[in-house]
Image: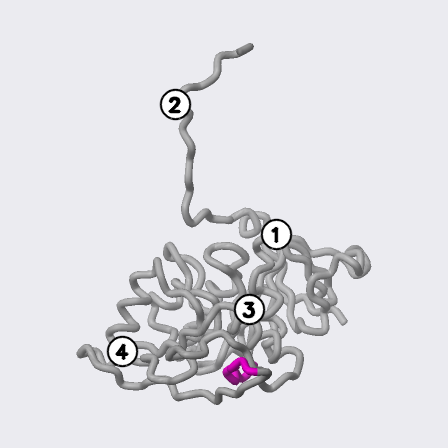
Amino acid sequence: MDKVVASAARAVADVADGVSIAVGGFGLSGVPDALIAALRERGTGGLHVVSNNCGAQDSGLAVLLAAGRISRVTGSYIGGNKEFARQYLAGELELELIPQGTLAERLRAGGAGIPAFYTPAGVGTLVAEGGMPWRHDGNGGVAIASPAKEVRDFDGTPYVLERSIRTDFALVRAAKGDRHGNLVFNKAARNFNPLAAMAGRITIAEVEELVEPGAIDPDHVHLPGIFVQRVVALTPEQAADKRIEQRTVTVRTNPRKEGS
């Protein structure tokens, strides 16, 4: 089945207001920027986003955040995004903050058909005991707090029950993909992308290089096409647009002389 869609705009044309979306990426690595930009142009709002973080440096999900299109975030990291912190503390959006490994497993479990699982991460904290601010009231108080979760003992160790995550849509970015939706990710860009793709009922992948079926060695496939419903081929310019979040340059103070 050929899953290629002509454009990012067409691929997200049925993403309606208020839906839930799992989004791949970690910082600026592996972020489906073209699909996010298409969502912004479409005007979709009231979104429940599930992602490790909510964009940075005015790119990625920060584009939707700045436009006021996101109403709820399930994620692990909000540092470095001042607008995210402002909206959260002002009570403009809801945030479920969870341990990063738990987020990864909740997405994977959702894609694998596992409804819930037990983990020791979060035991003895507000994650398990409840009371974590999900939404502020804008006046320094808490409008909505997280509920307590079930804690159960296994062989003398307490574990907290976490429910898996399924979303209406998922947006991911891959280095290479074929027309059947089989995907290959490049190094750090692999991060949350396969997990987000598994959790989405309709997964849309933007790929830097589109190849024909059979061109990818089956042993090299990171995510099989069964998890992907739509594929969008990026232009060379879009594929090459890869930002660096924090550029660090080392300056040699005592350069060695040639031949020394």
Q: Position of residue 34 (x, y in %)?
A: 51, 60
Q: Describe residue 129's horizontal placement relative to residue 108 as left or right.
A: left
Mark 3 or mark 2: which comes first in sequence?
A: 3
Q: Between tags 3 and 2, which lies in front?
A: 2
Whether tag 3 and tag 4 are in contact, CB under 8 A, the answer is no
As shown in the figure, which amino acid type bears the numbered disc 2? Thr
In the picture of the structure, the residue carrying the numbered disc 4 is 91
| Range drawn in magenta | 156-166
Q: Which residue is mark 2?
A: 253
Q: Earlier in the sequence, mark 3 or mark 4?
A: 4
Q: Give whichever of 210, 221 is nearer the camera.
A: 221
**Residue extending furthest front?**
156
Question: The residue under label 3 is which amino acid type?
Answer: Leu
The amino acid sitting under disc 4 is: Gly
Dot 3 lies on which element?
strand
Report the residue marked by disc 3. 171
CA gap, disc 4 to disc 2?
49 Å
| Label 2: which secondary element | loop
Horizontally, is 252 left or right of 169 in the view?
Answer: left
Residue 165 is covered by the magenta coloring:
yes
Residue 187 tag number: 1
